[in-house]
Image (cartoon, helix red, strand yellow):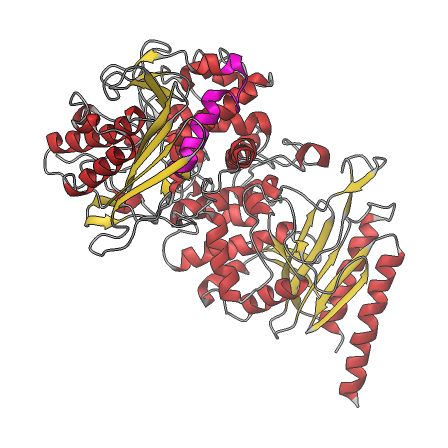
Amino acid sequence: MIAVAALTALSLLVPQQLDQIVQDRTPGVEMHANGHDYAKGNAPHNGQVRIGSITKSFVAVSALQLVGENRIELDGPVNRYVPHIADSRITVRQVLQHTSGLPDYVLAIGVNKIADIRDRYFAPHELLDAALAQPPLFEPGTSYQYSNTNYVVAGLMIQKVTGRPIGEAVQKVITKAGLKDTYWPGQGEREIRGRHAKVSVKADLLDPNSQVVDATNLDTSNAWASGAMVSTPQDVAKFFRTLLTGGLLKKAQLDEMRKTVQVDEKSAYGLGLESTKLSCGGVSWGHGGTIHGWASLGAATDDGKSAAITLTALPGTFGDDPMNKLQKMSDVMDTAFCRK
Amino acid sequence: MRKTLVGVLAAAVLVTGATGTALSTPGGSGVQKQLDGLVKQHEFPAALATVTEANGRSTAYVAGTSELGKRVPVPKDGQVRAGSNTKAFVATVIMQLVGEGKVELDKPINHYLPGAIKDDRITVRQLLNHTSGLANYTEFLGLEKFEDVRHRYLEPRELLDAANAHPVTGQPGEKFKYSNTNYALLGLLAQKVTGRPISENVQKRIVEKLELRDTYWPGVGEETIRGKHPHGYALTGNGIEDVTEMDPSWGWAAGQIVSSTKDLNTFYRSLLKGDLVKKAQLDEMQKTVDTKGEMWPGVEYGLGIASAPLSCGGRYWGHGGDIHGFETRGGVASNGKAVSVAVTALPGTFSDTPEEAGKAHDAVLAALDAGLCGAK
């Protein structure tokens, strides 16, 4: 009886919460939670989505695999692998943890205006150049500030160490995790390969009054190793579940990945992996990702639960309250992990 | 010492005087005989040629075997790594951009790519005709130990970094000195100005326009050759190796393209007819500089295309390419006839002396000459 009641709670509560999201001016939402697919609004069941910064978790796993093979030294200077970083004090760990102080490149290249970047190919070094033209945010290791530049550096590091493109290095992670619908877009690729929603974005992310435009096709070279990948809610959930259950990294490296710095009262950042406190006690481990048209969360817990959610517009695109919408996303994830 | 050639660096070792002796044999049979000679006398595993007449009709010839040590038929018009012919494609894109008013030939490259190189005086034109004096990055990648580099992916910036770490070979505009660095910069220029990958520019502006079915820019990390192709061989630390599969990212805008002898004919014919760039830009491309001692005898270098004399008088325009596993030579004569020849190893791969290597290269040029000077 208890089991039936628990199943009912999850299977009803999640759809209710997803309904609330689409009723509050979000065009669509898709979710995978503990083996079930949900879809509301314009989102197909388990359609392909741009996962944005969840890419960082894949890149971090690739880097930590190389640490496990003794090909990268976690506390060694990152400029051993990426000589363009002048400050020898910056370590690989600091890069993966956003404690390097490297300034973010994204606004410097103008990603806020989709018309300027939708069809624009950026070489990885253009992103790094834009970052390094700015002063450092702080002394290496003295603070935490999320900066996409860190993962461009991580991508270049992996390329240098493996002698192969980052897409190929990450494909090994994808293959090991058994993900069928996840890929690194090819150079210049702008369409999403599989079944997917059409998505919308503000013409200027910095201007709440700007009009809403289509964002479905996009050259994600502007995000590269900090956010270029395409996946599905099922695959994202499976990725974090496989990672957390030891299927992708040796224990020593998974332990390093979970050594965190505090971000706010509910969350802490490890190496490309973020912990979030759960209402039922304990934490989930995962990552968020926002990119033009898409907002996602994916995570898993130590006891083998996993979930991923994606919205087909960034919170705030259609006049909804972005903070409130992010909270709602977080709440559904909490439901998936805490309601039995 | 055996010498590996990179780019159209027909270095001194290959500059050994006049082309072959079979020039009197007319027409197609002459080409076939030349290809047979390339295989039998010069030990190239395979030789391929395509003759495209002024009216556009093409005839393909092959000799040898696709795979060393086996008898495997060589596919006519098979795909080959076209090496430095890539430069002609990239130059065409740049000249289209000049025609569109997006690039100025005599503006410094640093105007478009701030800080890319130290010398602010070096112009786009000097990159196109190899008079920039920039160090040639392929000398600094360890390509002489090809087995170590063969499967390595390199970012275009790494190529430029390697060049910038070495002293210049001359003052801007001073003299012709073949350098792959020039075309790495031109690739970056095309990307900067168009906001699209150089691969896509070549695909949209040339390959699709001319419907070249066997020409493509290998994708990031792509190591195999997509279509029917003969295998290519090179001398590495492991001996003679099948190097068909390789990561050509070290060649990039100086040498990454895969093509066929037929497609190369179509490309050079279209380019020289004025189908790809406007007349003003084609005229600029055909303004040449002397290449004395840097290429083979009589070669003059324009902007991404070169001309060389024919035994029957006149000159042909093309480029040629040398990359591990494949050498191509070809071009179009003033009568509109085009010939391209490919062999599946660089001259010198199977030779014991520089003289033999030089003769092997001469024989490739002789096959080309036989095709362009033959009857019809």
User: Which residue is at a point 82% across and 46% down the rendered structure image?
Assistant: A316
Picture quadrant where residue B272 is located: top left
State which region is magenta.
Answer: B260-281
Q: In the rendering, at what x and y percent does residue B364 appear?
A: 24, 32
Closer to the camera, A169 or A5? A169
Let me know if residue B346 appears in the view.
no
Q: In the rendering, at what x and y percent does residue B45 appear?
A: 22, 46
Task: Tell me if B110 is positioned left or right of B49 in this view.
Answer: right
Closer to the camera, A74 or B84? B84
Closer to the camera, B191 or A67? B191
Task: Tell me if B70 is positioned left or right of B280 in this view.
Answer: left
Residue lying furthest top in this view? B174
Magenta includes A61?
Answer: no
User: Which residue is at a point 78% across and 63% down the rendered structure image?
Assistant: A331
Q: In the rendering, at what x and y percent does residue B276 appear?
A: 52, 24
Closer to the camera, A277 or B53? B53
Magenta includes B266?
Answer: yes
Q: In the rendering, at what x and y percent does residue A184 appear?
A: 55, 51
Location of the C terminus of chain A by quadrant is bottom right
